[in-house]
Image (cartoon, helix red, strand yellow):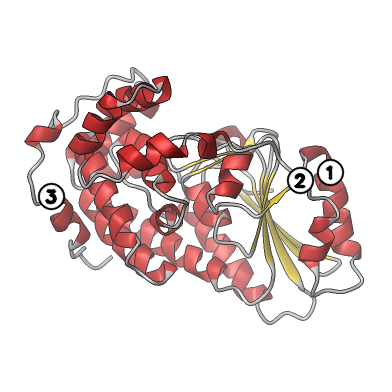
Amino acid sequence: MGELRTSVADGVGRITLNRPEALNAINHAMVLGIRDALASWRHDPEVSLVVLDGAGKRGLSAGGDIRALHANALAGRNDLSRHFWHDEYELCAIIDEYPKPFISIMDGITMGGGVGASAHASIRIVTEESRVAMPETRIGFSPDVGGTYLLARAPGELGTYLALNAATMTPSDALACGFADYYVPSERLPHLYQALGERADPGSPAEIILLFDETPPPSELLAHRSWIDRCYSCDSVADILERLGAESDTHAGAAANDLTRLSPLALTVALAAVRAARRLDTLRESLAQEYRVSSWLAEQPDWTEGIRARLIDKDNKPRWMPSTLAAVPANVAEVALNHIPPRH
């Protein structure tokens, strides 16, 4: 069946990420396949709307194919990674600007590149199984695939917290933070697919989804917004840690503990990237900034070390360089944000 399944039936163009053994990690060929399918359906009168979902029972997608990017780095072929990011980020923009309704089913694990393929859709559905995150700082990287654009527009400092701590959102959190639009129980998804194919009015998929939409539980993240806003409004990671240490809420202490285990370099760059994205007007501008940052971080040792520790050796004992926030050069964020990548 291939790593990407595409089909057209009853006016619905359906794209299914089909690497369930790798939790539907998105590789370069899949990016190009989605792009080509969307291009062929853009003016096809037989396609009224597009649905994106993932094969298997675990989730839409755990992200981009990090193992392939790691292999590129070890082989001295970061040009291949830049080429992948260029096409992946362009796909995010294509989805955001797509002229037909684009419905993403963010059922189960939806992280990193999975967010890029789904959270820029015009209609984004989460279920009780959804777990949504931009976990890049855990591997010495910074949120990308338009993640900084979304995080920068979350209420208060919730996006800053999610970016730095690589925290996972519940479906209710994803709705509250602007990563999703509707909550549909997973058992109702087959009926939703059927209804979308049988709809009488091809221009009203949102009205159909409302027939299946339910009220989710309260967002746990919103309940913690007061201390998150106080602490994560600082201009440096060191100051954020200091404020977290002064909080009495045990959740703040846990957040501080998480930060101390992550790459000081990646945290510094990620904070600057999200703050800079607040000043950008469009997703494309944020994607262009992310491409500069990603290209720069790919050349730093924390990128390969973070992947090694978390995904290859799985010892979860990364040796970050530099190892402390105090040792991070003062201008590192400016350098990353203004990096000029080689032509891919």
Return the x and y of residue 313 as percentages of the image width and height: 34, 21
Which mark is first along the chain, 3 or 2? 2
Q: Are marks 2 and 1 in contact (CB under 8 Å)?
A: yes
Kind of residue indicated by mark 2 = Val
When asked about the image quadrant of residue 50, the answer is bottom right
Describe the element under mark 1 as helix, strand or loop: helix
The residue that label 1 is drawn on is 188
Return the x and y of residue 270 as percentages of the image width and height: 29, 47
When asked about the image quadrant of residue 83, the answer is bottom left
Q: Nearer the viewer, residue 81 or 279?
A: 279
Residue 154 appears left or right of 219: left
Question: Could you tell me how far apart the alpha carbons at marks 2 and 3 are, in whole angstroms?
Answer: 43 Å
Return the x and y of residue 189 as percentages of the image width and height: 80, 46
Describe the element under mark 2 as helix, strand or loop: loop
Q: Residues within 10 Å of mark 1 (few under 14, many from 20)?
A: few
Which mark is first along the chain, 1 or 3? 1
Asked whether the viewer can see residue 77, the reply is no
**Which residue corresponds to the image point at 73% horizontal and 79% vertical from the top-left?**
44
Residue 124 appears left or right of 148: right
Vertical relation: 300 (above or below) 205: above
Q: Residues within 10 Å of mark 3 (few under 14, many from 20)?
A: some
Residue 332 has which mark? Answer: 3
Residue 7 has which mark? Answer: none
When asked about the image quadrant of residue 185, the answer is top right
Kind of residue indicated by mark 3 = Val
The residue that label 2 is drawn on is 184
Question: Could you tell me how far apart the alpha carbons at marks 3 and 1 are, in whole angstroms?
Answer: 48 Å
Residue 72 appears left or right of 44: left
Describe the element under mark 3 as helix, strand or loop: helix
Kind of residue indicated by mark 1 = Arg
Asked whether the viewer can see residue 224, the reply is yes
Q: Residues within 10 Å of mark 2 (few under 14, many from 20)?
A: many
